[in-house]
Image (cartoon, helix red, strand yellow):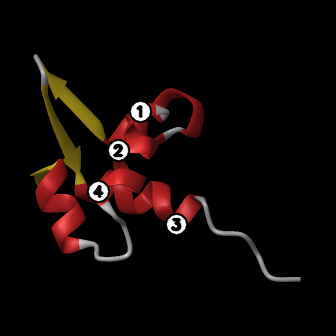
Amino acid sequence: MKMTVQQYVDSHPYYSMAAFRWILFNRTANGINKAVIKIGKKILIDSEAAEDWENSQREVAA
């Protein structure tokens, strides 16, 4: 499902808008660019791809 940044942050309360904007600003370095669709100035988030990215960021507890 495609969502605006505001919709994505509203549906994931563990992100603040500022934190998620920082993630988006650094999207090429952190790898979430696969979940970002940019049309002109509009940014949409592919929620399934973003959740896959979130799961790939997990650290395994020792």
Vertical placement of 30 versus 5: above or below? Answer: above
State the residue position of label 1. 25
Q: CA distance from mark 4 to mark 3?
A: 20 Å
Q: CA distance from mark 1 to mark 3?
A: 20 Å
Per the image, the residue denoted by label 2 is 21
Question: Looking at the image, do the residues carrying marks 1 and 4 touch, with CB atoms under 8 Å apart?
Answer: no
Real-space CA distance between mark 4 and mark 2, rounded to the nearest whole angstrom: 6 Å
Q: Which residue was labeled with disc 4?
A: 17
Q: Residue at x 11, y 60 (%)?
A: 7
4 and 2 marks in contact (CB < 8 Å):
yes
At 17% across and 69% down in the image, what residue appears? 10
Q: CA distance from mark 1 to mark 2?
A: 6 Å
Marks 1/4: CA–CA distance: 12 Å
**Do the CB atoms of the residues marked 1 and 2 lie less than 8 Å apart?**
yes
Residue under numbered circle 3:
55
Is label 3 in a helix, a strand or a loop?
Answer: helix
Helix or strand or loop: what does disc 2 sit on?
helix
Q: CA distance from mark 3 to mark 2?
A: 19 Å
Q: Are marks 4 and 3 in contact (CB under 8 Å)?
A: no
Q: Residue furthest bottom?
A: 62
